[in-house]
Amino acid sequence: MQTFNPELCYLNNTLQRGKRVVVENGFIVEIGEGDNSDKGLYLPGFVNAHSHAFQRGLRGRGEAFPAGANSFWGWREEMYRLVNEVASTSFKSWCLSAFQEMRNAGITTVGEFHYLHHEEQFDYAFDDIVIEAAKEVGIRLVLLHASYQHAGIGMPLSEEQKRFNTQDFDKWKTQIETISTRISESELCSLGLVAHSIRAVEQEAITQIADLAYHMGLPLHLHVEEQQKEIQQSLDAYSKTPMRFLCDEIEISPLVTAVHCTHTAEADMEEWLTRGGNVCICPLTEANLADGICDVPRIVRSEGVISLGTDSNARISMLEEMRLLEYVQRLYRQERGVCINSEGDMASYLVDIATKNGARTLGVKAGSIETGKLADFVVIDTEHQQLQGVTEEHLLAALCCGCDNSVIIKTIIGGH
Amino acid sequence: MQTFNPELCYLNNTLQRGKRVVVENGFIVEIGEGDNSDKGLYLPGFVNAHSHAFQRGLRGRGEAFPAGANSFWGWREEMYRLVNEVASTSFKSWCLSAFQEMRNAGITTVGEFHYLHHEEQFDYAFDDIVIEAAKEVGIRLVLLHASYQHAGIGMPLSEEQKRFNTQDFDKWKTQIETISTRISESELCSLGLVAHSIRAVEQEAITQIADLAYHMGLPLHLHVEEQQKEIQQSLDAYSKTPMRFLCDEIEISPLVTAVHCTHTAEADMEEWLTRGGNVCICPLTEANLADGICDVPRIVRSEGVISLGTDSNARISMLEEMRLLEYVQRLYRQERGVCINSEGDMASYLVDIATKNGARTLGVKAGSIETGKLADFVVIDTEHQQLQGVTEEHLLAALCCGCDNSVIIKTIIGGH
């Protein structure tokens, strides 16, 4: 049993003093009266709903432009170079770097959208490494295990994509069963299923993967409409957008998440949200990759569930992701206060996105400080220079707009 | 005399090892061979070309939207509330907070665009306080002393703007003479002149202020076209845009800086740049205030001199300003590598913006590590987790894209 007596604690969307949080076997079992003896503001730990940990190895790479400006596809070439130079040791070292940096950014759960599977042919050597690395760092991991079959709709994999290859649905399902057993041995790890994208997985397999996830009660994630080219390819092949395809072909539920949705049409988004689907946005990566500007106000108006991902890990900061989500909309629309809840509260809305919504997206019992939830916390130094002079009333907004990882004292995961 | 032996040093736009930098009376007097005994990467200290230090008091304020989204003008109401509640003590405390946080963000020179002058009627009490606060923190200050006369073109000041009032040009000039004497006593302080904006200063006075700056050899700064409303007011009153007005009425030189230029027309910008004028952009503040998206590629193509300002100080991070300048353009244009120099190098371009260009904008002999320049450095921890595994080739790009204030070990100002 552990007990925490936070000076300040984020409970029921308000900041409260004098609370005591009792933890048993990793879960919060009681919230009562405390003595403020634990310094700092306790928030639910941040949930990073979309990461490719190995891409931490790209930091600073692909950022020179001798031939002038390029695009997402130029960056992808650099990423593929990394993919093909990485070995077990370096793969593990990038995972360790990314996960450790995440903890220092207040992240307690990471959804690792994992598609770089093989060191040699079909060995799935990197699957275990992701799990080991997370375990060593002590971060809660949802291994989102990705099926990857195609270079594009109806196009065989290129040489440089061979390490992603999961072959047909049945073969991939066998690996899911294997890895599922491994994961059940690890206390901080759970499983989610992924069809990488409409580009990379064949039509029938996407339906099968979605069915499997639904019947296993696991989260399902897909990359959706990050790039206009993907939409065009889908229109050419299926005469419909990727999002329309998904709405037509799969069961949508609060465990199903479309990642990016940068260029999603209004009607498609409306249906996705109405049927309970989530949207994961990755502001820093989408900016770095020049993806374009998502119609976030449409999602906010429909009370859609947005979560956040650090994606390429070019920068790891949930606080910066939170403000960038709002700031990009401000710049584009010349309006302040786009990402707000029904009370007009931006800070609570952004904190929920980074915690509660991420937890739903990954199917973990975390994301809020309440009885029955996992004891995952991020502790903020309210006396840090970046928060100097800020009153309690404005603390969360100052955190969202004015702070970086320096204000994070520590993360606590499952009470430890 | 001080000597520095940086492990890594940014000289002539390249990273070099084994150099020795010798400093006398605050200036670099020699660069020779060294022994790498001083840990870290030495860059020229960052130059913050546009700040309103007291607005540090707003951090987290004006970020709730119970009546729904608002705009720059909604934020300004909150700012005016702060303006009218601040007293000498609190004004000084916000200045100290802002300046100290700037040093921790690697800033060695701040251009304080100072228009909140009076505690009581025309006492200019806050002018001295800015100077004192900078002195206590040990940051190099360019006091950009602002004339402020109007609420809008031809409109008398409102009650809440009384603390800005500098009355007519002659009265303001008297204060400039007074403050100029005070400043000459302070080693780390110099003076620049400001006409706050076309909105706030009468037509004739703008010309007089520009003349005075030109003849005194001082920098001249103005807010220009941050908001479309300002452009409309100028069109109504003068039948021309603010930028057109300036091009017609004042001497433009490398010491003259237009701040923001968010909505500046192409032809106006072209003339401004051709005649040697600078543009100061404040990415984080312009995002926070929902100003809109500046046509940065136009300035880059014309080889215009862009500098950066932390402006409202809602967040103080030059590294984040640098990446946001580029990232906003990437998102809006779906192109990567907008802010690049003639070699296609983004990182050097952004570092120059944050150093050399800022120094030109403020008229200080800083901004690069070379003989004859001020010994102002920011020292970066290349072993920090955020830079882990990054090779020297990609170090600057990783710094621009992947780091926050945590990587900054210290700043050195005038060799101390």
Image (cartoon, coloured by chain):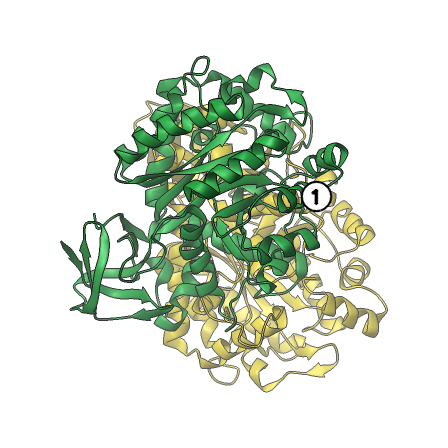
Chain colours: A yellow, B green
Residue A396 x/y as whole percent: 49, 33
Residue at the limit of the structure toward the right, as seen here: A239
Instruction: Answer whether residue A1 is visible to the viewer in this image.
Output: no
Q: Is residue B299 above or below residue B283?
A: below
Q: Residue at x 60, y 43 (%)?
A: A326
Q: Is residue B371 left or right of residue B198?
A: left
> For residue B357, what is the image quadrant?
bottom left
User: Tag 1: residue type?
Assistant: Arg
A17, B345: nearer the viewer: B345
> For residue B31, what is the image quadrant?
bottom left
Query: Pointer 1: what residue?
Result: A333
Residue B105 x/y as whole percent: 37, 46
Residue B58 x/y as whole percent: 48, 29
Chain holding disc 1: A
Q: Residue at x 52, y 39 (%)?
A: B210
Residue A401 x/y as whole percent: 50, 39
Q: Residue at x 47, y 84 (%)?
A: A120
- Label 1, residues with CA under 10 Å away: few <14, some 14-19, many ≥20: some
Q: Is residue B118 left or right of residue B248?
A: left
